[in-house]
Image (tube, grey):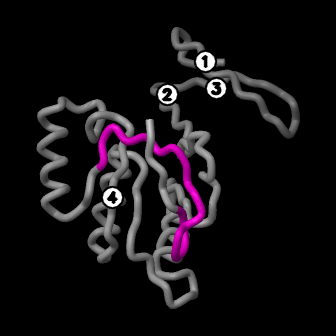
């Protein structure tokens, strides 16, 4: 429990089962993060990868480089036009991979003013990254050729 007035937290030692009170000057809650994987059919198909940490990045690099095969990824779809999605799309594009950002909302970077988001979208598209707005992902299906998934958009 947190007592902001007394500036203390109650700590439970799971090994001993004992609890005690710990004082603090400033309290920072760092809860970690986990990528949100919506309940979309086929989302757990091989090659649908989420990015949270360096191990995830290593997995993505291995996948796009062919994962031990001679087949490097030629196209990529990045689901979500937030900060991480945009950065991922830029990096994939720099590797020569034809990249599309798919965003369910009517603009990239949802919390931004539409004018700013529009300017960013124009810059991203001018660099060669495709952007699909108002395009929720309906399903991930077996690919018609190659590895990964075919992405089905719908509303």
Disc nearest the viewer among 2 and 4: 4
User: Is 14 on the left-hand or right-hand side of 116?
Assistant: right
Q: Which residue position is annotated with label 4?
A: 100
| Mark 3 burial class by Cα count in 10 Å: few <14, some 14-19, many 20+ | few
Q: Earlier in the sequence, mark 1 or mark 3?
A: 1
Residue interval drawn in magenta? 132-149
User: Magenta span: helix, strand or loop, mainly?
Assistant: loop
Q: Which residue position is annotated with label 3?
A: 22
Residue 72: x and y in percent read: 45, 82
With respect to residue 110, does 35 lie above or below?
A: below
Residue 34: x and y in percent read: 56, 45
Q: Earlier in the sequence, mark 3 or mark 4?
A: 3
Q: Is residue 148 magenta?
A: yes
Disc nearest the viewer among 1 and 3: 1
Q: Nearer the viewer, residue 97 or 10?
A: 97
- Disc number for residue 27: 2
With respect to residue 68, does 122 lie above or below?
A: above
- Disc number for residue 146: none
Spatial separation of the CA atoms under disc 2 and disc 1: 9 Å
Mark 2 and mark 1 in contact? Answer it, CB < 8 Å. yes
Q: Which residue position is annotated with label 1?
A: 2
Q: Quadrant of the C terminus?
A: top left
Spatial separation of the CA atoms under disc 2 and disc 4: 40 Å
With respect to residue 27, does 153 lie above or below?
A: below
Spatial separation of the CA atoms under disc 2 and disc 3: 11 Å
């Amino acid at each position: 429990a947190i007592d902001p007035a007394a500036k203390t937290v109650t700590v439970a030692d799971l090994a001993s089962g004992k609890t005690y009170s710990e004082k603090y000057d400033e309290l920072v809650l760092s809860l970690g993060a986990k990528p949100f994987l919506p309940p979309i059919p086929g989302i757990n198909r091989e090659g649908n990868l989420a990015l949270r940490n360096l191990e995830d990045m290593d997995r993505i690099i291995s996948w796009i480089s062919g994962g031990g095969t001679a087949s490097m990824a030629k196209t990529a779809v990045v689901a979500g036009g937030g900060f991480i999605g945009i950065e991922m799309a830029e990096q994939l594009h720099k590797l020569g991979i034809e990249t599309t950002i798919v965003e369910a909302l009517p603009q990239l970077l949802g919390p931004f003013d539409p004018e700013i988001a529009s300017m960013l979208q124009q810059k991203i598209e001018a660099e060669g990254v495709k952007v699909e707005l108002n395009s929720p992902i309906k399903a991930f299906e077996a690919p018609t050729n190659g590895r990964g998934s075919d992405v089905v958009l719908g509303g």
